[in-house]
Amino acid sequence: MNSEQIAKLAGVSRSTVSKVLHNYPDIPEETKQRVLKVASEHGYKPDVVPQLMKTSGQKTIGMYYFSKLEESVYERINANYNIALLVAVTTEAKQRGYGVQFDLIDLTHGPQALLDGINSDFDNHRISTAVLVGLDDDCSFVTKLARSNRHIIVLDKEFDTSTGLRCLYTDDLSSAMRACKHLADQGFDRIMHIAGDQRKLAGRKRKEGYLRALGRLNKERDHKCAPLVIEGRFTIEHGYNVGKRFLEERLYEQYNGILCGSDMIGLGFTKYISDRKPEILDQIGIVGFDNEPEDVFITPSLTTLEHNYRYFARMIFDLEQNYSEFKAGVSVKIEQQLIVRDSSVPKAKRRHDLPLQEYIGVRT
């Protein structure tokens, strides 16, 4: 039971339940006794944690990560992103005097159970803001959480902000176009796209950016390049399988630029080519997304577009602390940085002998 359910049974508002349980003096005795009776019958007691939070005045950000527990691959490939984001938010929280609560969005028991859990976190003052991470197109429950007095921030997903939702996402469309231009400027202008999950906003926008960029390149150049998009998941396995197809179908005779939907795709693709026909890697340019730690430990090191996790974290707290300004809802696009490494430059320009600290990449 939560305070909202107690309020319904007692025929009062949630705020009245809260006032009764916190012994406010302005509640009529009859109302007070009715609420206490319902609470007692259902064994309801306010949590100790919210009481302490109220006493200390500390607010808490709730970080809810979308998870499909039956998909172990999904968990593995998102580990670096999730950890980096959580570290950035926790660091920012310490600087601003907030706490952080971590939980998973698990739809195993249905969306209503999830809604009840997050509603309970709000109603019992465990959190002041809910940040939802990694949602896909099946997560329509989010709009049911939105209320005029709630801080709901969604990362990497577009929703109707008229409900008061705040959406933060990377500008993947522009980033994909920028990556394609970089490849073309280096001489790799016959570009294909190994796309990620199209149920994710990032997957769709990166594909759209690729198609726009290729259309622009075809107009600017005498030769035409037929678009090729191979869709799959944001996984090493997907990249590895496309690498196999790339060699078997001799796609390297048609394409010399590879835009990967994620670094994990790029790592899998590079692994397959490197093991079987490494000379092909000297003839093609590759760009990924996410700036995974493994990128600098493969040959050639992987050019990538990097999330600005610190900026994401600052925006989360800026939106939380300026709620009145953004209570009508807002969408914010965040730029990504291009980190140029060996995989996207001609062989003659590659920097094999640089110290690791420099080899991490040149941000542009």
Image: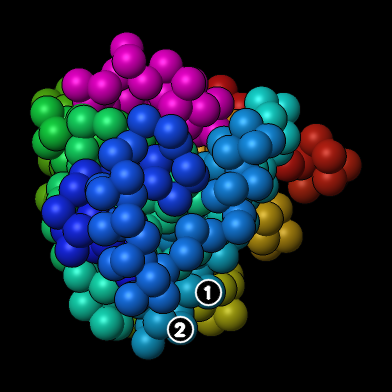
Q: Mark 1 — residue? A: 76
Q: Name the residue rendered at 39%, 46% in the picture.
A: 20
Crowd class of label 1 (few under 14; some 14 to 19; many from 20; radius 10 Å): few
Q: Is residue 33 left or right of residue 7?
A: right
Q: Name the residue rendered at 84%, 45% in the picture.
A: 356
Q: CA distance from mark 1 to mark 2?
A: 6 Å
Q: Name the residue rendered at 44%, 50% in the picture.
A: 21
What amino acid is at disc 1?
Answer: Arg
Residue 25, given in percent of the width and then of the height, sits at 43, 33
Which of the labelled discs sits on residue 266, or is there none?
none
**Residue 305 sits inside the magenta stretch:** no
Residue range in magenta is: 312-336
Describe the colour scheme in one phrase. Answer: rainbow
Question: Which secondary structure lies at badge 1?
Answer: helix
- Seen in the picture, residue 184 relative to 85 is either above or below; the reply is above
Q: Residue furthest top?
A: 325
Q: Could you tell me if residue 293 is visible in this image? A: yes
Task: Tell me the quarter of the image containing the N terminus.
Answer: bottom left
Q: Mark 2 — residue? A: 72
Q: Residue furthest right?
A: 355
What amino acid is at disc 2?
Answer: Ser
Residue 88, picture quadrant: top right
Residue 299, given in percent of the width and then of the height, sits at 67, 60
Question: Which secondary structure lies at badge 2?
Answer: helix
Crowd class of label 2 (few under 14; some 14 to 19; many from 20; radius 10 Å): few
Residue 119, given in percent of the width and then of the height, sits at 31, 55
| Camera-side residue of 64 and 227 | 64
| Camera-side residue of 133 and 8 | 8
- Seen in the picture, residue 191 relative to 218 is either above or below; the reply is below
Q: Residue furthest bottom?
A: 70
